[in-house]
């Protein structure tokens, strides 16, 4: 799927965190064209926060596929929750969600942290 020359146009990666005192969720979605969009649950608009190079975009899509999120069943919510999701419109959606007390596989946590580092 990802081994092609380009990322399929309907695929996306979403990394998010939310909850806590405010209950606000922040979702960051990487599109195949390299744009990273930010959506806060308390705001109606979406903003482009960064655009990655084609090579860096392909790298993230290869990495998310290698995580095999469809094989990692975890949907734990807590005061503060986090998730990584790989999806392609109605074709598939694989999501791993965890809270501070229930950590995901190290590979998922590393992917989450690496993605969030891009946004700094």
Image (cartoon, rainbow, N blue to C red):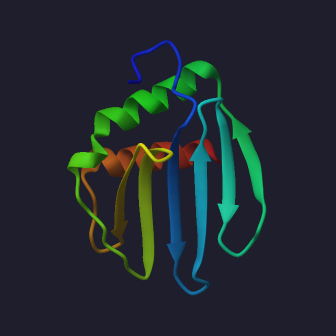
Is residue 100 depicted above or below 50 in this figure? Answer: below
- Give me the residue at 77% from left, 52% from top: 47
Q: Horizontal and vertical percent for residue 74?
A: 26, 63
- Give me the residue at 45% from left, 49% from top: 113
Q: Of residues 97 and 70, which is closer to you in this image?
A: 70
Q: How many marks?
A: 0
- Give me the residue at 52% from left, 60% from top: 16
Quarter holding the N terminus is top left
Q: Of residues 8 and 32, which is closer to you in this image?
A: 8
Q: Horizontal and vertical percent for residue 64?
A: 39, 37
Q: Horizontal and vertical percent for residue 120?
A: 65, 48
Is residue 38 depicted above or below 36 in this figure? Answer: below
Q: Horizontal and vertical percent for residue 95?
A: 37, 55
Residue 39 falls left or right of residue 20: right
Is residue 36 depicted above or below 26 in this figure? Answer: above
Residue 24 falls left or right of residue 59: right
């Amino acid at each position: 799927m990802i081994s092609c020359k380009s990322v399929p146009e309907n695929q996306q990666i979403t990394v998010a965190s939310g909850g806590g005192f405010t209950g606000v969720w922040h979702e960051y979605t990487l599109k195949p064209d390299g744009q990273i969009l930010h959506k806060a649950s308390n705001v109606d608009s979406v903003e482009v926060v960064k655009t990655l190079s084609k090579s860096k975009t392909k790298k993230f899509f290869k990495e998310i596929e290698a995580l095999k999120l469809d094989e990692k069943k975890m949907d734990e919510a807590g005061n503060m929750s986090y998730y990584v999701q790989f999806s392609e419109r109605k074709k598939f959606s694989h999501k791993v969600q965890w809270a501070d007390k229930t950590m995901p596989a190290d590979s998922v946590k590393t992917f989450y942290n690496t993605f969030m580092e891009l946004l700094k």
